[in-house]
Image: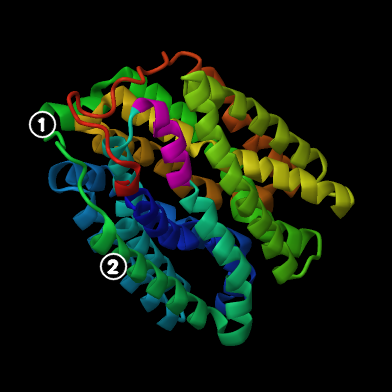
Amino acid sequence: MILGAGTLAQATFSAVSVGLPALAPALRSHYRLSLAETGVVLGAIGIGQLPTLLPWGLLADRIGERLVIALGLAGAGGAIAAAAATQRYATLVVLLIAGGALGASVNAASGRAVMGWFGADERGLALGIRQTAIPIGGAAAAATLPWLASAGGTRLAFVVLGCTCAAGGLIAGALMREPPLRATAGLGDLTRPARDPRMWLLAGGSALYLTAQMAVTTFVVLFLHEHRGLSSHAAAGVLAGINVLAIGARIGAGRWSDRVRARLRPLRLVGVGLTVGTAIVAALVDAPLAVLVPALVVAGVLGLSWNGLSFTAAAEAAGTRSSGAAIGFQQTMLGVLIAAVPPAFAALVVATSWRVAFALAAVGPALGVLALRRVPEPSLLGGRTRGTAAIPPAAR
């Protein structure tokens, strides 16, 4: 139950943070945006998350996940719904930033709940399942937002997204529970992730994967619609397919890491695949769609498959007392790239071409793999507090 509630809560916010690109053609038309301005709009949720991820993680360590997620998602829902009434680009960006700042609570907190309820031999799979919330929300949004925009414009789409976030907050408040014998974080525990060189390498190396992930998943709809001439609905269908396949990829990656009792080795191998996959997309930008679309899907699925491994490694390296702070720190480092990549990628496309932009995006995960080679594998014993009894599966 705990795992299901956290996954559902995350999915409601992911419908905005991951699914918004499906609305990009409608947003560009309604607000008369340039490609560069569209990049800022698509990056606004990430910009809002950046300064609040670590504070939300610290707060979760102090007062628990349930209240943090419920309050954050309720506020995010209000901000996103308010975006329905906007007519100006600047106002839209401000409200999306506010929604991202409040919705960041679910990113930093719900992974911490998994750390408290699951042991080391099942934590990779549990966080993999929990991380499926992101492609679940993205797939649902990609499948529905173009139709909502056709029926009622961007106004209807934002109202539905806002109400969905608020509902996620209510579900989290009603169903999530604190793990038994939850350790209380002291000040040293809260600041330890930021003082640990391993955390900087782990978070920084993982963050570099986002140059490729964001390039593909954030811009696939605009690229296929504007550069290759697909309808907005068909292009969004490709994004939905990427997210559907990524659900299985995240679960598989988590189970894989449990079986080999390692997080970083699978993470590095995924990075190699992501580098190659994105480079192939760059080479095929003008190839027949029958060749290009599968390449985009493979690169997109690889780009969405690794996050659970990275978060599990960060939380295990920090231990239960600081897992919320560690995940918040990790998310903050990722947030820098989440906020920066969409505007930078769009500007790069305008200045050069789609081919050059995708090729440069492929460099990020290659550098990330090199950074992660310097990080020792965290102990899988650093999760549940010593002496905590096994938790019955039904309670989770």
Residue found at x 32% / y 73%: 78
Spot occupied by residue 373 in the image (x, y as percentages of width and height): 51, 15
**Mark sitting on residue 170:** 2
Which image quadrant for residue 174? bottom left
Is residue 125 a member of the stretch shown in magenta? Answer: yes
Q: Residues within 10 Å of mark 1 (few under 14, many from 20)?
A: few
Q: Residues within 10 Å of mark 2 (few under 14, many from 20)?
A: some
Between circles 1 and 2, the one closer to the viewer is 2
Q: Is residue 275 above or below residue 113?
A: above
Spot occupied by residue 246 in the image (x, y as percentages of width and height): 60, 46
Counting labels gives 2
**Mark sitting on residue 187:** 1
Which residues lie in the magenta part?
120-131
> What colour scheme governs how the chains and residues are painted in the rendered image of this protein?
rainbow
Residue found at x 58% / y 30%: 365
112 left or right of 183 in image? right
Spot occupied by residue 203 in the image (x, y as percentages of width and height): 40, 30
Which amino acid does the dot numbered 2 rest on?
A: Leu
Question: Distance of mark 1 from mark 2, alpha carbons?
Answer: 30 Å
